[in-house]
Image (cartoon, rainbow, N blue to C red):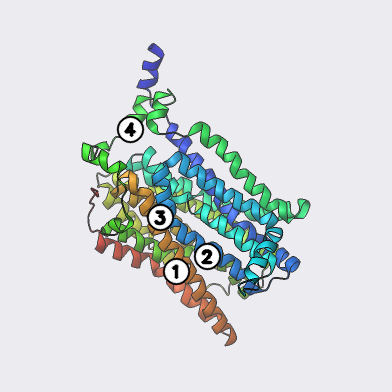
Amino acid sequence: MEQNKIIDQKMTYYRWNICMLLFFATTINYIDRQVLSLLQPLLAEKFGWSYTDYANITAVFQFCYAISLLFAGRFVDWLGTKIGYASALIVWSIGAVIHAFANSIGSVFSIILSTIGLLIPSSVAGFMFARFVLGVGEAGNFPAAIKTTAEWFPRKERSLATGIFNSGANVGAIVAPLSVPLIAKYLGWEYSFITVGLIGFLWLIFWKYYYDSPKKILEANKMSNAEYNYIHSDVKNEFISDISKINEKKKIKWFYLLRYKQTWSFIVGKFLTDGVWWFFLFWLPSFLKSYYGMTGVQIMLPLAVLYSMTMIGSIGGGWFPTFFIKKDIDIYSARMIAMVIIALFPLTILLAQPLSKINYWYPILLIGVGASAHQAWSANLFTTVSDMFPKNVVASVTGIGGMAGGFSGVIVSKIGGWLFDYYSALGRIDIGYSIMFVFCATAYLLAWCIMKILVPKFKQIKL
């Protein structure tokens, strides 16, 4: 009894264990999605893919990921965080492993599709199926992670926690090119997919052991009352009346959530800015090849440096609002002040092309500043949902906005491809990049202005 009293009086930090679990899950998430792009030259030669074949395979992932985000949020809210997150990771890990057997699986799908007049090579059909499974599963990561953050952190710490786990995306973007080619070289390309898929199942062991609701962790004596009370320090704003308890069990329809300007604020923020991040992921290697003739291992160091910069933006951006919160500014105002300052940094991208003639490091570092600002923006944008919505619908709202962001990525990639083809034919591909860089530089200020118009002041939703 005496020992329990001592534990209860001291602040523990169990919530940061949970944050680390989210960080590693997000890292695995990004490694899994990058394996195909890193092995594309090898697989295209082995299976005789055209650029159209590869584009169709990647498009399946983007569309499935975008659409599944809408249902993933609802799925996690329905099953609860522990089971919902684990289920999503199991699905995307299975999807990763399926890639290793895609050609064999595709033979069956190819025969079935041929009966309705669709002649698709077996390898293409198999990889499409694998990307479909991967996209469905990976859609659950961010809705589940944001919901977990809402459950385990008070509002003033949520953007920092989000920034930390979101930096896992940057770590994944660095680790994948450093490890996947080596696995493929020494063990075979199939084992690249199998290895990263099995890592996900390893994560499940730690998730099962460490994760539960704050209340159950407190009852298990793994966390002090001091930390539990700190996590719920803003509980007076969480609507714990009898009515809200009923609402937590009540099924909330998507269209009902669309009644609120706060939902549309998040949708706009994701739609206008997520496409920028997808553009960086898919087109930076092409930019380096077009301007400097860099391919293969030549682009690994520049990209590693760039994505290392984004880690600073993700964590620093998550911390940034606390600077204003400590000055007694309310949380929403502090977050919006931080976001408008962050939105100014991508303007540096406008200098990428003018300085590109000097040395390739100038555009890399300037685009790195913009990409870093995106991660800082994203950490705060995600947190606006948990700031304003009850915990029982956080994953659903995150999924709705995530779907908008996913479709934004498809649109930006398609427009970019069209612009580059058009201006490349005219011998002026630099104009195509100029147009895209202008969009990347100004999207955040435009998004912030619309968000501020929609939600000028903090207002928490009562469902």
Residue 280 bears which disc, if any?
2
Q: Nearer the viewer, residue 48 or 455?
A: 48
Q: Is residue 85 among what the camera can see?
A: yes
Q: Amino acid at mark 1?
A: Cys
According to the picture, the residue beneath numbered tag 3 turns out to be 399
Residue at the (52%, 52%) spot, across then down: 137
Residue 21 location in percent, x, y?
Answer: 51, 40
Circle 4: element type: helix
Please report contact status of discs 2 and 1: CB closer than 8 Å, yes or no. yes
Please report contact status of discs 3 and 1: CB closer than 8 Å, yes or no. no
Closer to us: mark 3 or mark 1? 3
Q: Amino acid at mark 2?
A: Phe
According to the picture, the residue beneath numbered tag 4 turns out to be 230
Q: Amino acid at mark 4?
A: Tyr
Circle 2: element type: helix
Side (left or right) of 367 relative to 304: left
